Amino acid sequence: MRNPKHRLIRPASLTRVLVRALTPLLVASTLLAVSQSTDTALAAGNSISTTTNVTASTGNGQCLHPSSATDPINCNAYADKADVWLSNLPGALADGTYFFAVIAPGSQANPNDGSPGLLSTDSHTDRTFTVSGGVVTSTGTHLSENNRMQLFPFGDTPNGGGVYIAAVCSLASYPAAGGDCKYDAFKVGADTPDTAFPLQVSKDATGSYTRTYHWGITKAADKTLVQQVGGNATFHYTVGVSHDAGTVSGVTVTGTISVFNPNADAVTGVDVTDVLSDGTVCSVTGGSGATIAVGGNDFGYTCSLTGLPTGELDNTATATWAQQTVGTATLAAGSDDFTFSAIAFTGTAVDACVQVTDSVAGALGTRCVGDANEGVPFTYPRTIPVLAGCFSYPNTATFTAGSGATGSASATVRVCGPLATGALTIGFWSSKNGQGVITGGSSTATVCNSGTYLRTFAPFQDLSPTAKCADVAKYFMTVFNNASGATMNAMLKAQMLATALDVYFTGPGSTTATQKFLPNSNLGGVTIDVTKICTNIPTCSSFVNASSSFGGATSLTVTQLLTFAGSQSNVGGSSWYGNLKSAEELAKDVFDAINNQVAFGI
């Protein structure tokens, strides 16, 4: 196997007779690259070609094949070197600055000045031109006429078949790598009928793969719970998207193998094969037992890999033929190969970008792999009015990728205003209306039912078990009056007594008459958050955590609060919480908040 930098040089004696008109040939253009770069300086699309320029001021000879008095699209054989012109330049090249070179076959890896295979006899700066808006302009010393560039002067090819390679390379960087160039083959002169020349192989190679990214999404709020009296609660949300390293698939090497036949007749029974340097055998379309017509013959090929190569990957195409008669000459059995070095792989990204939307904020924006904002979260505020009671507000962010892949993340916040329980204060129960509610309550065998309920709690067991409703009303007033400026346990007893009456008359003691003042809301079953208790009613700008006075519980129903507080008292409530004032005060604050409807739920 020969490296393209060290191709076989045919003896000069084989080329000395190339002086007559050439038998018809067809040349196929090839794009050969050895650069490891994934960027190509030349535009994709049509290849360059060579042709005649019969209306030019000089070098205006006709094409030998195809024989034509006018300029063919692609001329394969010329009578004189001066008749060779580059054509199809605007069609094959993007706007830019280029240079051309005539080189020997196999020298495509290095078309620069000083290359052993360079046949152009002047400097690359003499061979420069520009393409702009479809117009070709010479910026060196070579002629440019009819949008074509004259290749002459150049030396004789060492190739036994009389083949030359025209290279056009980008001047974006110099010296140019093979991958920065496009190529076309041509011949000057004619064969002798008794000489058969070996086939010439060249090829290009393009590595490609697909990298599919998988994304995730997160969403969070700066807080999840707001408890406050009135106003608005503002939350700040953060939405982040991230991706993995991507899953690589569809790793392939594709391209075209060009087999050039410099002889007068076709060569038959040619096997064209292709193999990667890692041993991967490629599939060549029509490569078995092929007939190689005069001129250029192209074979597409595909190599499938299980993953991206970890090092340099080369690609060698080989044409093999048996001994045979070509025209009147004998072509010896042989082979020719060409190695394309350092295949560059270019990836196609799938789902490299995602659109991010939000159920509240709407469209948040786009995030892409490798962009300046990659990893930068989206943020936005949301303001929610504080209503009576607790309400949850879910919020979902979603990403959508180009393939339709999607994912979501949610954050739920809870906004709690004071519970609208209908509870009433000690001031109400000491008023005419409150006293009327108590005295108008139901009785069982003259025993007031509200009194029976109150006696289930130790602090109120100093109330007579036979108390009539009027006695219960008087009992409340006694407790109420004792609470004014008295000890903490007396104030606690008054607040707890008001809460107990609220529970009774919004539950089992509720009647049409009582509902004029208290709703039938079953206050005893309402859960209270004891970790945030207002201490400066009605402003409620100061809060305490009262859970330590209720066994460390963070929330309890009102009935559970009454039961626990009652368990910390002796009969009649003269000793409470072991007379620990701070514990008594916390319990008092809880019942005071309930009675003033500034307690929070959960």
Image (spheres, rainbow, N blue to C red):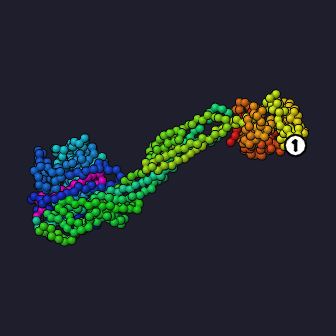
Q: Position of residue 410 (x, y in %)?
A: 56, 45
- Looking at the picture, tell me which residue is in the foreground, 77 or 304: 304
Would residue 338 appear left or right of 420 to someone viewing this image?
left
Q: Is residue 303 above or below residue 466?
A: below
- Looking at the picture, tell me which residue is in the foreground, 313 or 176: 313
Which image quadrant: the N terminus? Answer: bottom left
Q: Is residue 93 above or below residue 322?
A: above
Residue displayed at 67% across by 37% down? 389
Reply yes or no: does residue 191 show up in magenta: yes
Q: Is residue 479 above or below residue 211?
A: above
Q: Is residue 472 above or below residue 128?
A: above
Reply yes or no: does residue 426 show up in magenta: no
Element at badge 1? loop
Which image quadrant: the C terminus? Answer: top right
Residue 348 visible somewhere in the drawing = yes
Q: Position of residue 193 (x, y in %)?
A: 10, 65
- Looking at the picture, tell me which residue is in the foreground, 101 or 54: 54
Look at label 1 and name its amino acid.
Asn
The magenta stretch is: 178-192
* Residue underneath mark 1: 570
Residue 125 visible somewhere in the drawing = no
Residue displayed at 30% across by 53% down? 179
